[in-house]
């Protein structure tokens, strides 16, 4: 019996659970056996494996294979930031974000920050603020929390601090955003 060959890859832009489900579905539809999938890593098997085919499938969904070690590290950093900001229900983990990243990635924060900045062209802190603003937008659209509650959940010292940061990063005020993108519940 022929020994089963497993292929492990890191995938760029597979940063959330929805992306994992999409990749899993697409690969299975094309005859791949998905052995493990945990952003940004996939482990799979296909008897007539073709890396070019895999790259083409992923590219249709804005994803690609990552072969460079530093680029793999950057994707792991992005995944950790996504988990921290979008899925964490513990405000303490956002407050201690550098500790969280150090624990999750098992490397010094200075190294994490340096690799990220070198490959992404922005600082890790700026990227994290961008992600926080994206999460704030989601929370505003959901219309389940007051602005005070959102400020607390996202570790802003006050509503004023959140509002100032929102205007700086998004170019519009919170009120303008709410007028454009939220709708009253029936």
Image: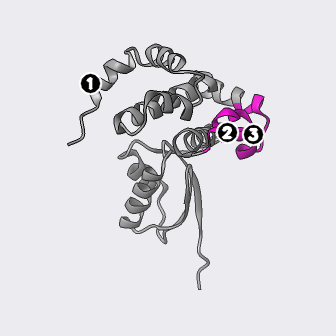
Dot 3 or dot 1, earlier in sequence = 3
Which percent across, then down, holds residue 112? 71, 33
95 within the magenta span: yes
What stretch of residues is rendered in magenta? 90-112
Q: Which mark is residue 7?
A: none
Which of the image's four quarters has the N terminus?
bottom right
Residue on which the image places disc 2: 92
Horizontal side of residue 178 vs 28, given as left or right: left
In the rendered view, would you say 7 is above or below 164? below
Q: Residues within 10 Å of mark 1 (few under 14, many from 20)?
A: few
29 within the magenta span: no
Pointer 2 and pointer 1: residues touching (CB < 8 Å)? Answer: no
Q: Secondary structure at mark 1?
A: helix
> Depth check: 37 or 87 in front?
87
> Depth check: 2 or 86 in front?
86
Q: Secondary structure at mark 3?
A: helix
For image coordinates 41% across by 66% down, the residue present is 28
Horizontal side of residue 181 vs 81, given as left or right: left
| Distance CA(mark 3)–CA(mark 2) | 15 Å
For image coordinates 36% across by 66% down, the residue present is 29
In the rendered view, would you say 105 is above or below 150? below
| Distance CA(mark 2)–CA(mark 1) | 32 Å
Residue on which the image places disc 3: 102
Residue on which the image places disc 1: 180
Q: Residues within 10 Å of mark 2 (few under 14, many from 20)?
A: few
Dot 2 or dot 1, earlier in sequence = 2
Task: From the image, give the main secondary structure of the stretch colored magenta.
Answer: helix
């Amino acid at each position: 019996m022929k020994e089963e060959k497993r292929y492990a890859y890191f995938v760029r832009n597979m940063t959330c659970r929805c992306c994992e489900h999409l990749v899993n579905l697409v690969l299975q539809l094309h005859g791949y056996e998905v052995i493990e999938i945990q952003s940004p890593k996939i482990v799979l098997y296909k008897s007539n494996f073709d890396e070019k085919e895999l790259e083409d499938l992923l590219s249709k969904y804005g994803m690609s294979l990552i072969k460079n070690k530093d680029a793999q590290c950057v994707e792991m950093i992005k995944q950790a930031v996504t988990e921290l900001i979008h899925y964490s229900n513990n405000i303490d983990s956002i407050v201690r974000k550098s500790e969280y990243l150090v624990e999750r990635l098992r490397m010094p924060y200075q190294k994490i920050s340096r690799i990220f900045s070198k490959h992404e062209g922005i600082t890790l802190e700026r990227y994290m603020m961008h992600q926080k603003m994206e999460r704030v937008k989601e929370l505003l659209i959901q219309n389940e929390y007051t602005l005070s509650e959102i400020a607390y959940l996202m570790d802003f010292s006050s509503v004023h601090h959140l509002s100032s940061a929102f205007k700086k990063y998004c170019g519009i005020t919170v009120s303008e955003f709410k007028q454009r993108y939220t709708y009253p519940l029936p």
